Image (tube, grey):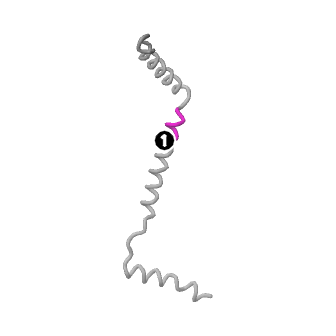
Amino acid sequence: MDRFLGAGATVTSVANAATGITEVFRENSTRRMELDEEAYARAMAQLSGEFAAAPRGWFDGLMNGLNRLPRPVMT
């Protein structure tokens, strides 16, 4: 029916314009959720990079063990 009247493209362009005008006054909540999720993913990636455990050698294990000895000895 739209092809016969030639209004299909016109209706689509008017709908797109109305959507654009609406987003000027009110933000797109779906886009906001996408941006929030992206920011959260970047923050988690940064956090995991900062607190990733470095590979430990025998000396690190020895020092870690020595540092833990005073607590049980004091009791």
* Residue lying furthest right: 75
What residue span does the magenta drawing correspond to? 28-33
Q: Is residue 29 magenta?
A: yes
Q: Amino acid at mark 1?
A: Glu
In the rendered image, residue 49, in percent from the top left (x then y), is placed at 42, 60
Q: Does residue 53 appear to the left or right of 21 in the view shown?
A: left
The one nearer the camera, 72 or 34, is: 34
For the N terminus, the quadrant is top left
Residue beneath disc 1 = 34
For label 1, count other residues whose C-alpha is less than 10 Å away and answer few (under 14), some (14-19) or many (20+). Answer: few
In the rendered image, residue 37, in percent from the top left (x then y), is placed at 49, 46
In the rendered image, residue 22, in percent from the top left (x then y), is placed at 53, 24
Answer with the quarter of the image where residue 70 lies. bottom right
As drawn, 42 above or below 58:
above
Q: Does residue 51 appear to the left or right of 29 in the view shown?
A: left
The one nearer the camera, 42 or 69, is: 42
* Residue lying furthest top: 5
Give the residue drawn at x 60%, y 87%.
74
Q: Main secondary structure of the magenta part?
A: helix
Give the residue drawn at x 55%, y 26%.
25
Q: Secondary structure at mark 1?
A: helix
Give the residue drawn at x 46%, y 80%.
64
The one nearer the camera, 4 or 13, is: 4
For the C terminus, the quadrant is bottom right
In the rendered image, residue 45, in percent from the top left (x then y), is placed at 44, 55
Q: Is residue 15 magenta?
A: no
Q: How many marks?
A: 1
Give the residue drawn at x 51%, y 44%.
36
Q: Does residue 22 appear to the left or right of 57 in the view shown?
A: right
As drawn, 12 above or below 34:
above
